[in-house]
Image (spheres, coloured by chain):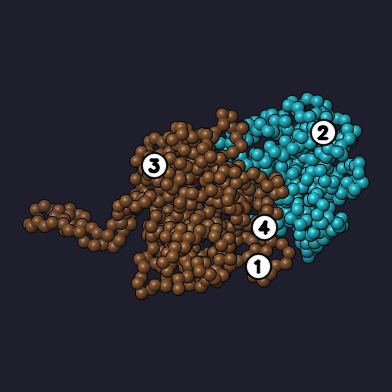
Chain colours: A brown, B cyan
Amino acid sequence: FLGAGGGNDIQWCFSQVKGAVDDDVAEADIISTVEFNHSGELLATGDKGGRVVIFQQEQENKTQSHSRGEYNVYSTFQSHEPEFDYLKSLEIEEKINKIRWLPQKNAAQFLLSTNDKTIKLWKISERDKRPEGYNLKEEDGRYRDPTTVTTLRVPVFRPMDLMVEASPRRIFANAHTYHINSISINSDYETYLSADDLRINLWHLEITDRSFNIVDIKPANMEELTEVITAAEFHPNSCSTFVYSSSKGTIRLCDMRASALCDRHSKLFEEPEDPSNRSFFSEIISSISDVKFSHSGRYMMTRDYLSVKIWDLNMENRPVETYQVHEYLRSKLCSLYENDCIFDKFECCWNGLDRQVEFFSVLHFSIVMTGSYNNFFRMFDRNTKRDITLEASRENNKPRTVLKPRKVCASGKRKKDEISVDSLDFNKKILHTAWHPKENIIAVATTNNLYIFQDKMN
Amino acid sequence: MLGKGGKRKFDEHEDGLEGKVVSPTDGPSKVSYTLQRQTIFNISLMKLYNHRPLTEPSLQKTVLINNMLRRIQEELKQEGSLRPMFVTASQPADPLSDNFREAQPAFSHLASQPLLPTDFVSTMPLESCLTPASLLEDDTFCTSPAVQHDGPTKPPPPALQPVKDSFSSALDEIEELCPAPTSAEAVAAETAADDSKAHPSESNIHKPEGLPESRTAESKLMDSLPGNFEITASTGFLTDLTLDDILFADIDTSMYDFDPCTSATGAASKMAPVSADELLKTLAPYSSQPVTPNQPFKMDLTELDHIMEVLVGS
């Protein structure tokens, strides 16, 4: 597995952990989404309480070349509040389902955050100067008596303690009857899509009172509903192409140029069922919880309950690669159905840097990462075909100490240091992970803590 | 049990009850398949109908559970079509026998397996099958008074007249294991050590026989369901089985003790993954030792006795 040596094997070390230490998890602190911005300098998390916390990476200290900058809290704000739907007599959760950053165009940073019903565009800006020396106002803001003004001066900007302000610039509301599961910014950086269980809408970032419905799978008779949309994403390069995944394990690629309503897909990606693995739960575990394009746009990755699959966009009938995340759970599906774990939505991500230049040669590496239970997370190296299981835990995690690989013993004799399936803690799930776009730094969210790991730099 | 002719090892057997294909055509394993199917059916129903969230339930989850129920119902219908008796009618109220037969799939649960097509003889006495609660209301249903009283509150281990010997011994084992009240407690004690598991759904399931007409009860239930429950409210897939029969009958939940509340907060997740699997293992002891599954219950009974003594005696 990774870490066993070799040229470009990454050795992951603990760097930081954010969040409360105690085991008693406050519901509002449960992390629900994690996302690096385009430069990697900022790392945003959303939680069940509707808050967004943004961490900023310290500028690299020249003297401390053995580690990259640490992430410290940059801004915290309440993005969404709980609401009440009076028609249905139901609460609308304030939980942040997704955060997506816009590429930086000026000094301010912009991100989209969404709960089940409403998407908001937030502007995060810094203020480190303030004007001083007004003629008519005192420094504390009180107005001066004009008769006491004898001289005039020009107010100047003086430095002040850095203040980071977040303000909502756009609110995109009332366009979704069902729960929003995805938002994705188009490569034109002007439009974005939002997807709920049955519909996908296209928005312009500047326009909040109108959105275009581009996919609608709601049947005329709801009794006939057997499939829902689970995730959607724009192609990274082609601004008219997007994909959406379903609860039946299919992915549809649509081209917006084909028609206004993209109910007919251009491509349908689906792997035929393996008859030897059929069970009552086949459909449920085939439901796709996340779909992510590769940076090149040539491949896409899907996550279902037990595996990660890599698809070549040119081949619809089966994935090109399949990686088993926790196959040992296949025999526990009934229990996992009973306690609802089978409905857990794991996300997946690609490594950030597609290539790295080393000694004048260009090495391509491609690693995908996803979470599991017991605070384990998994990485699959697509080139070496090696995989590794690591744990996000406060114990045994010292900075710059390489993480020890974990192993789950499926059955039979448990070796030393292995963990048996029955000892796994299904409360400790890692659903959200993110990879820095340029460096080997990863952010892994446990229930209420955020772990940051980086590779060991020599 | 896997039906592929491979030698069965202990590990495989442990895994084999779940996930893997348990073909409905294998001998005793057919019962375990049916058991598993019934368990999943009941769990699915409870998930749909006991969930009273403040927020809207996840549509994806609802759809997946619905699909599960539909699939099982389709299977039941197909199996039922092997016997003419099992043809589903859309008017469950009228011929009592029809109503009775249709209701069978809903609770041919642990104690009796009247569902098994090859085993069924049309002359099977009514006493040997469970009676849906709604039927007990019906005055005209008076052919077997024994059934009326025994029905939902105390599912008796019926004296089935099985066709095959091996099958009958297997069934007897199931009956021994299955819900008489004390053994049910023992199972509950064994599989759910968490005392704090209140079971709010209990009151919903173990409704007394004094039920109103099935239709009004159903509509009441529908009204009380929160918001966007369009799918389950229409219950297209349930029209053949009277909703009442399933919901208000005495489904014994002690065997798979789970608590929707704790599963939401995840309090006892560590226990839960163990219970359903072990449940299935203990309920279908077709590997080799018929004796073993009884022993845990006996042990727990003595433990219970001991605990009672401690509580009361000292």
Residue A283 is left or right of residue A245, and the answer is: right
Quadrant in which the C terminus of chain B appears: bottom right
> What chain does badge 3 belong to?
A
Residue tagged 4: A328
Disc 4 marks which amino acid? Tyr
Q: Residue at x 63, y 35 (%)?
A: B232
Q: Is residue B229 visible?
A: yes
- Residue at numbered disc 3: A191
Gap in Å between the C-alphas at discs 1 and 2? Answer: 49 Å
Whole-percent x, y for residue B104 in the image: 79, 36
Quadrant hosting residue A404: bottom right
Furthest-left residue in this view: A150
What distance separates the C-alpha of mark 1 from that of mark 3?
48 Å
Whether callout 4 and callout 3 share a subunit is answered yes
At x 48%, y 58%, the residue is A351
Asked if both marks, 2 and 3, belong to the same chain, the answer given is no
Tags 4 and 1 both on a single chain: yes
Depth check, mark 1 against mark 3: the one in front is 3
Given residues A255 and A360, the one toward you in this image is A360
Q: Name the secondary structure under disc 3.
A: strand
Residue B82's label in the rendered image is: 2
Could you say which disc has been placed on residue A125 in the image?
Answer: none
The amino acid type of the residue labelled 3 equals Thr
Q: Secondary structure at mark 1?
A: strand
Q: Which label's residue is closer to the chain start, 1 or 3? A: 3
Q: Which residue is mark 1?
A: A418
Distance, label 2 to label 3, CA atoms, is: 57 Å
> Is the residue under label 4 in contact with that under label 2 (CB below 8 Å)?
no
Q: Chain of mark 2?
A: B
Q: Are discs 2 and 4 both within one chain?
A: no
Q: Secondary structure at mark 2?
A: loop
Instruction: Name the subunit of mark 1.
Output: A
